[in-house]
Image (cartoon, rainbow, N blue to C red):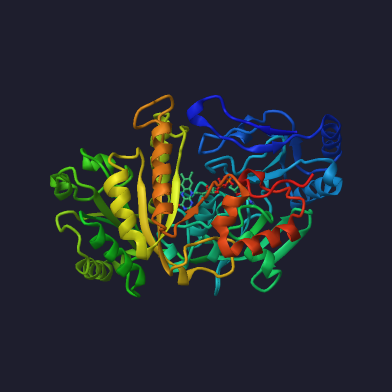
């Protein structure tokens, strides 16, 4: 049977086609899974949390959850499902920290693998020459940062929020304000261990099984479950100068951002965000930022205009304090921001890199973290960014979206070639993230319906104006949409699927391939 599940709330619609196993094959799967010899265990109860994610809009109950203790637990389970073959249409989803937006880590009536249970290998560091750490793919980036800092090291490239797993972000890209320098996280990994959709355990890197390595990076979980990763590290600075300046003109703002990402002598982190608000400028700033001298900023009136905030950071050690101040002055002197709007704060490396978690805890306290998140993440080529800004920030978004709007350029020449990650064709493109939170049951501007409608208007504009946009963390619903998304890369993507996961067992929540049954 094919079943279409729609949640009851009209504004909360999440549809997907799912196969249903027939009762006899259902019992067979159950029996077969129960007979597996595992170091960890399988649970057929308490399944609700595996049907939830950060997006809080899709809820698909699995049949069972595997809590693996070893790679063998994962490989023998998948091999078992593969060997049963077409009698069943059971699918398998690796679940990292479940911070997907639309059910990407869920498997309706399938098996969810709780990757955080996989604690092997223990973190192992190499500290000399090209330093790295070997970690389980279920490890959270925040734990890797904690352990690395003890050795004076840190991952070269991160995400803004670190309470995500290695496997979860490597399956997408892992983009943040360090990507202009080091590329995204998928650039900064030397080796992976992967369990394919046939249950084989394969080690891969640029030199060994490179096709699988490239496929899995940004591969949306389609070709295998990453079980171990070798992550590139660099020397960590102890302190961070964290700076924000404002612009009222988008062209000036983006020009400065583009100059900064293409200069040799520049900041270590470059991002930015849009402030769309008629009132309370400071209320809209990310709450973790605590400016040393808030006086000029609080005197500044936006007069209802849309503002653009450049956010940059310079890493340093206390002994370099004087030279770093001089360097920052020189870098700032080349920028064209509104001079009275300089915010500067000095924090520890950990405070800076874990900054979003502070906001999370505040929102958790107010019950505003587990709300629906209709996020939209777009990659826009540099040549069309002014058209995009004019229409979207000037016309479509007339009110705050109830969450930050990040915007910053990255440089494709720094990105690893041949991965599954899809980007616009130009060398420089912008990441624009509309990170909205909807108030449950609201039918107003802070409600889900309104936000989804705004997203749709933005996407429609991009299509009509032929902006050449690609979605990041995309949630396309049909294979045709995915083919369009991948464009010329589709052929390689589909070829890899037929090699590494020919029965389309893995990551059904991405809705790219249908399980062969
Ligand atoms: P999950 O949601 O659990 O899984 C994501 C997908 O990967 C699923 O399809 C799943 O099946 C698959 N998967 C999970 N583990 C594995 C594995 N080991 N092997 C193979 N496939 C696997 N992204 C950025 O790039 N930059 C940011 O700055 C950023 N900030 C964020 C901030 C917040 C608050 C949130 C909620 C998300 C943010 N993201 C960011 C997006 C984030 O990178 C993705 O949502 C990521 O997938 C989350 O990781 P996870 O461990 O929760 O993955």
Side of 305 relative to 487 (left or right): left
Of residues 486 and 51, which is closer to you in this image?
Answer: 486
Residue 116 visible in rendering: yes
- Position of residue 466 measured from the top left corner of the image (x, y, whole percent): 42, 58
Question: Residue placed at 61% from the left, 53% from the top?
Answer: 220
Q: Could you say which quadrant of the image residue 267 lies in?
A: bottom left
Question: Residue placed at 71% from the left, 64% from the top?
Answer: 203
- Position of residue 375 measured from the top left corner of the image (x, y, whole percent): 45, 43
Quarter of the picture holding the N terminus: top right
Of residues 75 and 58, which is closer to you in this image?
Answer: 58
Which residue is the extreme one toward the front? 464
Side of 339 relative to 162 (left or right): left
- Position of residue 318 measured from the top left corner of the image (x, y, whole percent): 32, 64
Determine whether 166 is above or below 1 in the image: below
- Position of residue 86 measured from the top left corner of the image (x, y, whole percent): 83, 45
Determine whether 471 is above or below 260 in the image: above
Determine whether 53 is above or below 292 in the image: above
Quarter of the picture holding the C terminus: top right
Residue 316 visible in rendering: no
Question: Residue placed at 37% from the left, 64% from the top?
Answer: 382
Q: State how many labels appear.
A: 0
């Amino acid at each position: 049977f094919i079943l279409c599940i729609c949640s009851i709330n009209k504004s909360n619609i999440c549809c997907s086609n799912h196969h249903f196993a027939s009762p006899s094959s259902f019992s067979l799967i159950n029996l077969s899974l129960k007979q597996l010899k595992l170091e960890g265990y399988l649970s057929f109860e308490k399944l609700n949390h595996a049907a939830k994610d950060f997006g809080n809009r899709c809820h698909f109950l699995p049949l069972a959850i595997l809590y693996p203790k070893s790679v063998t637990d994962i490989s023998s389970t998948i091999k078992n499902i593969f060997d049963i073959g077409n009698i069943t249409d059971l699918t398998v989803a690796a679940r990292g920290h479940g911070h997907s937006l639309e059910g990407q880590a869920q498997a309706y009536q399938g098996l969810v693998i709780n990757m955080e249970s996989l604690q092997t290998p223990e973190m192992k560091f190499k500290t000399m020459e090209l330093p790295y750490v070997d970690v389980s793919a279920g490890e959270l980036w925040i734990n890797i940062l904690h352990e690395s800092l003890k050795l004076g090291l840190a991952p070269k490239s991160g995400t803004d929020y670190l309470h995500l797993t290695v496997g979860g972000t490597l399956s997408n890209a892992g983009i943040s304000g360090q990507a202009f320098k080091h590329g995204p996280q998928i650039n900064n990994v030397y080796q992976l261990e992967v369990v394919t959709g046939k249950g084989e355990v394969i080690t891969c890197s640029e030199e060994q099984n490179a096709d699988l390595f490239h496929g899995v990076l940004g591969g949306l979980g389609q070709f295998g479950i990453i079980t171990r990763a070798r992550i590139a590290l660099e020397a960590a600075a102890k302190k961070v100068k964290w700076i924000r300046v404002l612009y009222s003109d988008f062209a000036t703002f983006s020009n400065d951002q583009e100059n900064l990402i293409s200069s040799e002598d520049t900041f270590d982190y470059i991002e930015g965000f849009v402030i769309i608000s008629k009132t309370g400028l400071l209320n809209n700033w990310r709450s973790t930022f605590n400016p040393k001298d808030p006086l000029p900023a609080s005197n500044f009136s936006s007069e209802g205009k849309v503002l653009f905030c450049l956010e940059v950071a310079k890493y340093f050690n206390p002994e370099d304090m004087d030279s770093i101040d001089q360097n920052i002055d020189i870098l700032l002197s080349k920028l064209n921001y509104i001079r009275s709007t300089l915010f500067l704060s000095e924090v520890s490396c950990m405070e800076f890199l874990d900054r979003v978690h502070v906001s999370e805890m505040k929102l958790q306290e107010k019950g505003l973290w587990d709300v629906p998140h209709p996020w939209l993440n777009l990659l826009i080529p540099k040549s069309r960014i002014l058209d995009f800004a004019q229409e979207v920030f000037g016309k479509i978004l007339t009110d705050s979206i109830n969450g930050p709007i990040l915007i910053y350029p990255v440089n494709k020449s720094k990105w690893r070639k041949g991965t599954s990650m899809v980007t616009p064709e130009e060398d420089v493109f912008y990441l624009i993230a509309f990170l909205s939170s909807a108030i449950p049951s609201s039918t107003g501007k802070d409600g889900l319906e309104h936000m989804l409608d705004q997203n749709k208007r933005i996407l429609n504009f991009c299509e009509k104006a032929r902006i050449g946009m690609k979605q990041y963390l995309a949630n396309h619903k049909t294979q045709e949409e995915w083919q369009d998304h991948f464009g010329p890369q589709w052929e390689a993507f589909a070829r890899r699927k037929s090699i590494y996961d020919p029965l389309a067992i893995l990551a059904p929540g991405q809705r790219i391939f249908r399980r062969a049954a």
